[in-house]
Image: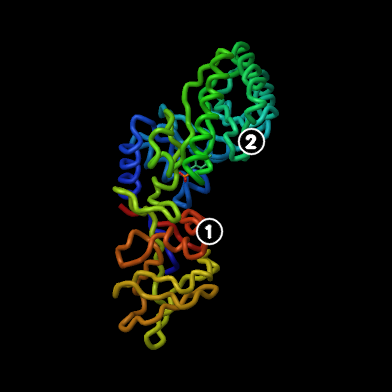
């Protein structure tokens, strides 16, 4: 049997509950990009919706439509913030998807499509608060706000939200971003527009900086039990996904396991430790389809090795592995290829 990414339904539900308790009264928007951080878009949507999650952050329209299909008639909102084509905007409006708008051109495209359809578009307006990654610059905001106000008067827009994204590099920068966000809200209100929601924070700031939270919090990582790189463990949060491979050959006190770089396991993880039934052991080398574990007397063919997970066999978390190679936990999970089977567990 090949390597498996085991996904725990109980852990996802517990993590979501812990995040919602922590951020209340702010509402969770569960972020679903990269196939729900590698956990599977459809399964994650259905599981979270069953627990009452009613905001989903899709990134692109194609994913938003897949989420919408799983949600069916449920009273839940799906937000897609990637700038999209006219055809995608058309599909999004037909399906009642909320759109993130970070440029004047995209606003014009949405206005055109809404007018053609004879409907109004639900939009979330993005102010650039310093990240310079999609968003209206503060100097362009007053004119943008006037265009939006006209679109609302014409029945083509409904302002479902005002939003931005934080750099999370320092508290001071994030405080400055919040001040910029509030100015944008004032300008919008002066133009006669009141956004239904405000959202600025992702996992780390939502958890650690309550004063920055809006009415919504866009959270991915922590709901999947992925802590921040160089960040502490979090109360009530544990990894949802475990990567499991099996021993396929033995060589003295070395065990060869059936996972390698072709499965998306970075070969630079050599030197990390993994969890075996005998406890933590060193990962000596990662080849194309296998990896070698050192110093493990008594291993048997078929034994399960936990490459990352919550620590049941002494394994590290995906984030701890990621820190060794200068990346983030979500990257270690989403890099896994289709060779790795996904298995849902209770
Ligand atoms: C990825 C992303 C998030 C979620 O970030 P996490 O740190 O995983 O919680 C929120 N907002 C935007 C715009 C994102 O791209």
Secondary-structure class at tag 1: loop
Q: Is residue 297 above or below residue 215?
A: below
The residue lying toward the viewer, choosing from 123 and 115, is 123
Measuring from the top left, give residue 269's x and y in whole percent: 49, 69
- Which residue is farthest bottom? 252
Looking at the rendering, which quadrant does residue 82 occupy? top right
Q: Is residue 156 above or below residue 323?
A: above
The residue lying toward the viewer, choosing from 161 and 210, is 210
Residue 324: which numbered mark, if any? Answer: none
Residue depicted at 38% across the width and 88% down the height: 252
- Which residue is farthest front? 172
Residue 83: which numbered mark, if any? Answer: 2
Position of residue 17 in the picture relative to residue 202 (left or right): left
Q: Residues within 10 Å of mark 1 (few under 14, many from 20)?
A: some
Q: Is residue 75 above or below residue 201?
A: above
Measuring from the top left, give residue 233's x and y in whole percent: 35, 53
Residue depicted at 45% across the width and 74% down the height: 271
Residue 335: which numbered mark, if any? Answer: 1
């Amino acid at each position: 049997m090949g390597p498996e990414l085991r996904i725990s339904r109980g852990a996802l539900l517990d993590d979501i509950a812990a995040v919602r308790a922590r951020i209340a009264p702010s509402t969770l928007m569960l972020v679903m990009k990269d196939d729900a951080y590698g956990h599977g878009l459809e399964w994650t949507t259905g599981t979270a919706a069953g627990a009452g999650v009613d905001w989903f952050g899709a990134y692109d329209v194609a994913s938003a439509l897949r989420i919408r299909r799983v949600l069916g008639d449920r009273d839940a909102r799906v937000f897609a913030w990637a700038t999209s084509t006219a055809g995608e905007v058309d599909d999004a409006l037909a399906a009642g998807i909320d759109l993130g708008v970070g440029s004047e051109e995209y606003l014009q495209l949405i206005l055109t499509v809404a007018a053609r359809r004879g409907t109004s578009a639900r939009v979330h307006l993005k102010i650039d608060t310093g990240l310079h990654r999609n968003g209206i610059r503060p100097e362009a905001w007053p004119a943008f706000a006037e265009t939006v106000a006209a679109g609302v008067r014409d029945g083509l827009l409904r302002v479902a939200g005002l939003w931005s994204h934080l750099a999370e590099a320092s508290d001071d920068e994030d405080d400055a971003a919040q001040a910029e966000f509030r100015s944008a809200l004032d300008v919008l209100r002066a133009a006669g527009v009141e956004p239904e929601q405000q959202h600025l924070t992702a996992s780390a700031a939502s958890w650690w900086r309550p004063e920055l939270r809006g009415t919504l919090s866009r959270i991915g990582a922590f709901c999947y039990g992925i802590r921040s790189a160089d960040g502490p463990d979090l109360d009530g949060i544990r990894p949802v996904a475990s990567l499991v491979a099996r021993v396929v050959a033995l060589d003295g006190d070395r065990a060869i396991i059936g996972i390698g770089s072709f499965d998306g396991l970075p070969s630079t993880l050599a030197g990390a430790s993994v969890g075996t039934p005998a406890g933590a052991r060193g990962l000596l080398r990662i080849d194309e389809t296998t990896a070698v574990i050192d110093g493990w007397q008594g291993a048997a063919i078929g034994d399960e090795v936990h490459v990352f997970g919550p620590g049941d066999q002494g394994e590290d978390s995906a984030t701890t592995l990621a820190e060794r190679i200068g990346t983030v936990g979500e990257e270690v999970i989403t890099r896994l290829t289709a060779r790795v089977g996904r298995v849902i567990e209770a």
